[in-house]
Image: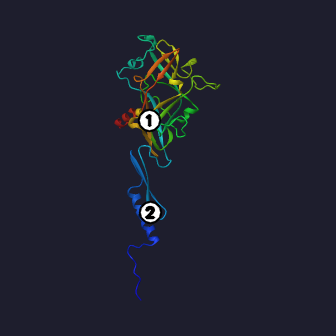
Amino acid sequence: MGRAYRSPRGKTASQKVFFSLLLFSIVLLSLGLIRCDNACVLVVSNPGGSIGTVSGNGPSCSLGTTSGTASVRIAAHAATAGDEASRIGAHALGAGDEASRIRHVFLTLRGIEANASAVADDESPDWQELAPKLAAQPVQVDLFAAGGDSCEAGGFESAAVRADAYRQIRLRLAPNETDSTEPILGQNSCGSAGFNCIVTSDGDIRPLVLARDALEIQVTPEHIAGGFFRIVSEASVNLEIDFDPNASQFIPTEGIVRMVPVFTVDSQGRCESAAGTER
């Protein structure tokens, strides 16, 4: 009795599954999850034994919901003239008026958040807290503080943040007027002027407000080094948020001062670079 001829191209279902799983294992071992600044690819197994991929483009590509750790510090931009007086005395509320020169800029922060979208609005559910304790315990910072650009000043406790590429940061301010009967700050350098203010050389304290009386300062991609920063799963990143007094504007108006601030963000900040050099 003759044997039935079987085509070498014909494979049983079990053989197809075996070879697909073998190929899948080899791909995972050699490639795994491919990610870079411009694209990411995830290799997956489809029902029936075939191999497929899921991919995305650009820094917003995000796979999974793992988290990393972010540490944030706010600093004053280093003086361009190498002298503190040139930095904190560069802004006067009256032309040529030494007494009206700004000596302190106090902001009370109640949140520092990041969003993966460059166009996310205030109501976006995707804002991620970078300093979550500020919501319950606001902190008042002096953007013109002596030594404010030192590596020991301006830091906040690190926080777990969803792994992603982030294109926007916002600083949320406490309002100058509040209905709360509970003290917001243990010590308020603005006194009766509210929680955000400027102090001039002659000791005058004036309320500080933003354009359109906003309570948020947006830091958009053009002010973030590289256009975005990345939080990587199970890794730490140090974010340095620098206030640039030379690019910012202070406009006195009817007893208050309107500020048009400029902040920049770098995930490889000056302090981290200095620490790496010392090692």
> Quadrant where the N terminus lies?
bottom left
**Closest to the observer, 27 or 131:** 27
The x, y position of residue 219, in whole percent, is 45, 32
Q: Quadrant of residue 272?
A: top left
Lower position in the chain sequence, tag 2 or tag 1: 2
Q: Which residue is mark 1?
A: 239
> Quadrant where the C terminus lies?
top left
**Closest to the observer, 127 or 155:** 127
Q: Which residue is mark 2?
A: 50
Mark 1, other Cα within 10 Å: few <14 / some 14–19 / many ≥20: many
**Closest to the observer, 30 or 261:** 261
Q: In percent of the image, x 42 and y 11: which residue is there?
A: 95
The x, y position of residue 238, in whole percent, is 43, 37
Note whether 43 is above or below 219 in the view shown.
Answer: below
Q: CA distance from mark 2 to mark 1?
A: 43 Å
Residue at far right of view: 181
The x, y position of residue 148, in whole percent, is 44, 25
